Image (spheres, rainbow, N blue to C red):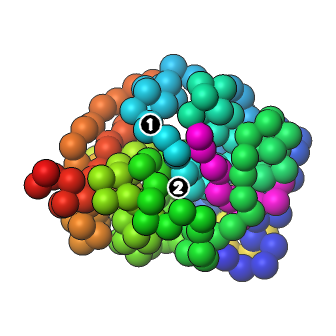
Amino acid sequence: MNDGALRPYEQSLRAAGRLALVDDGGRQVSLDVARWLDSADPADDTVLARCAGPVLDVGCGPGRLVRALSERGIACLGLDIAETAVWITRGRGAPALLRNVFAPVPGEGRWPTVLLMDGNVGIGGNPRRLLARIARLLAADGRLIVEADPDPALDLTSTVRFLIEGTPVGPSFEWAEVGLAALYRHAEQAGLYPVDVWSAGGRAFTTLVSRLTLTR
């Protein structure tokens, strides 16, 4: 991601401000910063109930899920490239590491559960590359829980900027939006396959595992 591209996001986290993404064609995607700063909600609880620790939350943001996992006594670690997000997570009493998921990560190949929530399957604008990376982080019998776009057919990669009060700000970066049907196509290329799918609170979720797990 370009230098400074995250600055509007970090400002929004500090001020609990409204934020969106906008692509080159003017299409906007709202970002639910207020929900991310809040406690885990009932839809999040359906994810937490499926977590076997230790859990790695990729793109943990301000840490509502790692905090909720910690409160349940489940070992976990948040991972984020935004300093403010990591600072807020740690301030909530939850563990977080300032790290890009494509850099070396503690426990590689041994994580029982990895989370990609809140549209984070879009990180880097290349879902196949991201899912292949996650597959290498998982334990042999591990699971990846992904939140997909509610539109199952959506499979879009765009160059976007953050949008604050109708004004694009900061450098552009690549982002992807992926619904369940598209996610499954990308996941298969990474050797990951669905074993569970559900919806809650208007949000779509799925659990993916490796072929090795399926054959056991």
What SS does tag 2 mark?
A: helix
Give the image location of residue 31, x and y in percent: 63, 45
For this view, does 45 lie left or right of residue 70?
Answer: left
Label 2 is placed on what type of residue? Answer: Asn
Q: Nearer the viewer, residue 107 or 96?
A: 107
For this view, does 12 lie left or right of residue 143?
Answer: right
| Crowd around label 1: few <14 · some 14–19 · many ≥20 (10 Å) | many
Q: Nearer the viewer, residue 100 or 150?
A: 100
Label 1 is placed on what type of residue? Answer: Cys
Q: Quadrant of residue 76?
A: top right
Of pointers 2 and 1, the one earlier in the residue sequence: 1
| Crowd around label 2: few <14 · some 14–19 · many ≥20 (10 Å) | many
Quadrant location of the N terminus in the rendered image: bottom right
State the residue position of label 2: 120
Report the number of discs.
2
For this view, does 143 lie left or right of residue 184?
Answer: right
Q: Quadrant of residue 193?
A: bottom left
What residue span does the magenta drawing correspond to?
A: 75-84
State the residue position of label 1: 51
